[in-house]
Image (tube, rainbow, N blue to C red):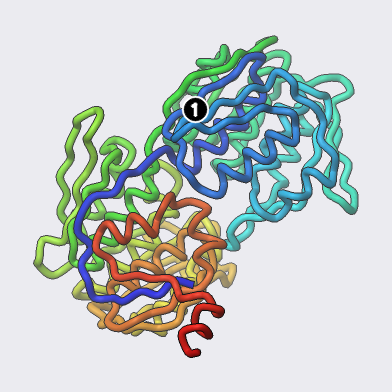
Amino acid sequence: MLIIHGGTPLEGEVLVRGAKNLVSKAMVAALLGTSPSVLRSVPAIRDVEVVTGLLRVHGVDVELDGDTLYMDPTSVESAGVEEINVHAGTSRIPILLCGPLLHRLGRAFIPDLGGCNIGGRPIDFHLDALRKFGAVVEKSADGTHLSAPNGLHGIRYELEYPSVGATEQVLLTAVMAKGTTELRNAAIEPEIIDLICILQKMGAIIKVHTNRVIEIVGVDELKGYSHRALPDRIEAASWASAALATQGSVFVRGAQQADMMTFLNVFRSIGGAYEVDDDPVEGGIRFWHPGTPLKPVALETDVHPGLMTDWQQPIVVALTQADGLSIMHETVYENRFGYTSELRRMGANIELYSDCLGGTPCRWGRRNFLHSAVIAGPSKLHAADLQIPDLRAGFSHLIAAMAAEGTSRVYGVDRYITRGYENFEAKLLGLGAKIERPAPASAQLASRD
């Protein structure tokens, strides 16, 4: 539990390291190499710890020096079900190890998968693609076992939806499959392109065509890589939204304009101000509240280059302070507005609808999913006891608590926030936030005595 005394503008600077949504996949890619890999700008987050554990039980030597990760996969080996299950329920990464392990060992195992409860993220896309590559999938009580008795071969495959995870699965499997793979309706997020850059450094042949088509020519061998992960655009946007909601000013060192263009347009449309520093070492983006009333907007999330679904929660918190009615139409996940119930308890005026309140109907329309939100502002937020439901919503609860009057208690920070935000408490303190951890029960009893 974290105690937050709200009402103080956030002022100062934070550093953003490599993207959570790239680093874990880059670590998996190291399994494909016949020589060591080096990954730089690695954040100290729990997802990195989880993948480190998964790699180590498969015989990969993993060492972290500062923010640089060294991975030596030359002695990859099979891991027991019990060893792998230690990590079951903590991450959805195990599914992505299948392709590399099938190439290296001829077999793989998937435990029960965890992750944030934000809507259906079935592994059917993954298993269907792996079967087409030639994998044999056998489900059992302890998880899913895969083998490749005849090896893996290239395929022509079209995704029903440009899923990031399914695109990553195809990439990590196709690079060493016999023949050529053509993936249609692929995700093209910056983290996907950065993963492609890593695989290309390893020796892969990957062509990114127009209209979401990716062509991969399988090769017989891949070597290790040396790479600096692209900055985390989700974390950068979270700090930007925190600056706006608390009427503060935050310089996000490491944030890059190119990958945040859609967010920057929204930030300016709401009434926020920003300034880009292009210095390659010390550069970043400063975000601040200019002191004028924030403006309502109508937005909808979408796959890249649209408004990222992981940006909507912090933006919604900022929109509670806008002067008028705003609309947020969520088209990526069907259950991503659960966090708004806590915001309403804090005084936010938010109504949810199953209708598509966006420019175009989406796949959740007429399916009774509450996937559109109307936010009426400005709302005077007041303190409350908050229970974090997932990673991104959790950080939005922190933002709301800092913008609110009074003292809030936020529960679940260690379970969720540390998955994707490095040293978030130290960063908040550095920005002037008034936060504290409750004293241990033993200390409280001692103080009473």
Residue 146 left/right relative to 203: right
Count of numbered circles on the image = 1
Q: Is residue 402 visible?
A: yes
- Give amino acid for label 1: Leu
Quarter location, residue 154: top right
Q: Quadrant of residue 396?
A: bottom left
Of 91 and 35, the residue lying toward us: 35
Residue located 70% across and 34% down the image? 56
Nearest the camera: 139 or 22?
22
Using the image as rendered, state which of residue 382 and residue 356 is in the foreground.
382
Disc 1 element: strand
Residue 127: give x, y in percent of width and height: 75, 40
Q: Residue at x 29, y 49 (%)?
A: 14
Q: Is residue 241 above or below residue 138?
A: below
Q: Which residue is mark 1?
A: 39
Residue 350 picture location, percent across and down: 37, 78
Residue 441 is situated, as x and y percent measured from the top left of the image, at 55, 80
